[in-house]
């Protein structure tokens, strides 16, 4: 037998991750309609940013964002910001493929670009360089505030185009 290893193009990989979000979108919408709070880790923002951060000219942030348009938009995005120096001090840093200073600097820049294009109030940046207790208390407070404002926020929204 011959050894065969598939080498997917980065565009294809990005679209597969986006397709996965589209597969689960209906379930998210149904849960929200039932009054269930949905918490998602590394949703559309992360997918677009990490793909664009690879530096491929034809895989810009704008290109990477397009497949996200129409997906359920979170009422709130919590972004845990930590300096590269602080992150490197924590256990396991550098184990993942993209955990290097060059990539993480580009990722932080692109997150800020994407966040600047989002509606005001959707993005909440949390200083994750503090103690676990401090960070968790801030997250709990922001989540509680958001849940209390659900009636004001209104029905489930969808992602729109951004000019990135």
Image (cartoon, helix red, strand yellow):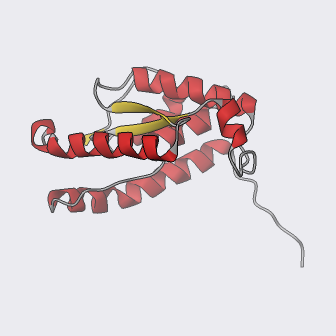
The one of 106 and 71 positioned closer to us in this rendering: 106
Name, please, the residue furthest toward the right: 2
Q: Is residue 17 above or below residue 160?
A: below
Q: Quadrant of residue 146?
A: top left
The one of 60 and 29 positioned closer to us in this rendering: 29
Q: Is residue 43 above or below residue 152?
A: below
**Residue 58 is at least partly visible in this image:** no
Q: How many marks?
A: 0
**Residue 104 is at least partly visible in this image:** yes
Q: Is residue 86 left or right of residue 15?
A: right
Q: Quadrant of residue 94?
A: top right
Name, please, the residue furthest toward the bottom: 1
Q: Residue at x 29, y 63 (%)?
A: 27
**Looking at the picture, how far across and down is residue 14, in whole percent?**
57, 45
**Looking at the picture, how far across and down is residue 44, in whole percent?**
44, 43
Q: Quadrant of residue 25?
A: bottom left
Q: Residue at x 16, y 59 (%)?
A: 35
**Looking at the picture, how far across and down is residue 78, in whole percent?**
40, 39
Q: Is residue 161 above or below residue 151?
A: above
Q: Quadrant of the N terminus?
A: bottom right
Q: Residue at x 42, y 26 (%)?
A: 115
**Looking at the picture, how far across and down is residue 117, in whole percent?**
39, 22
Q: Is residue 164 left or right of residue 94?
A: left
Q: Is residue 50 above or below residue 97?
A: above
Q: Is residue 33 left or right of residue 5?
A: left
Q: Residue at x 21, y 61 (%)?
A: 36
């Amino acid at each position: 037998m011959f050894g065969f290893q598939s080498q997917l193009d980065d565009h294809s990989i990005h679209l597969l991750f986006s397709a996965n979000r589209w597969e689960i979108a209906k379930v998210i919408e149904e849960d929200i309609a039932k009054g269930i709070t949905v918490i998602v880790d590394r949703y559309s923002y992360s997918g677009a940013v990490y793909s664009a951060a690879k530096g491929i000219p034809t895989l810009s942030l704008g290109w990477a964002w397009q497949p996200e348009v129409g997906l359920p938009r979170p009422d709130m995005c919590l972004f845990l910001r930590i300096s590269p120096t602080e992150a490197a001090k924590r256990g396991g840093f550098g184990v993942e493929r993209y955990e290097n200073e060059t990539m993480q600097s580009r990722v932080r820049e692109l997150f800020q670009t994407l966040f600047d294009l989002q509606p005001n109030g959707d993005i909440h940046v949390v200083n994750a360089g503090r103690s676990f207790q401090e960070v968790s208390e801030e997250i709990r407070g922001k989540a509680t505030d958001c849940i209390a404002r659900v009636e004001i926020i209104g029905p489930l929204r969808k992602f729109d185009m951004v000019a990135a």
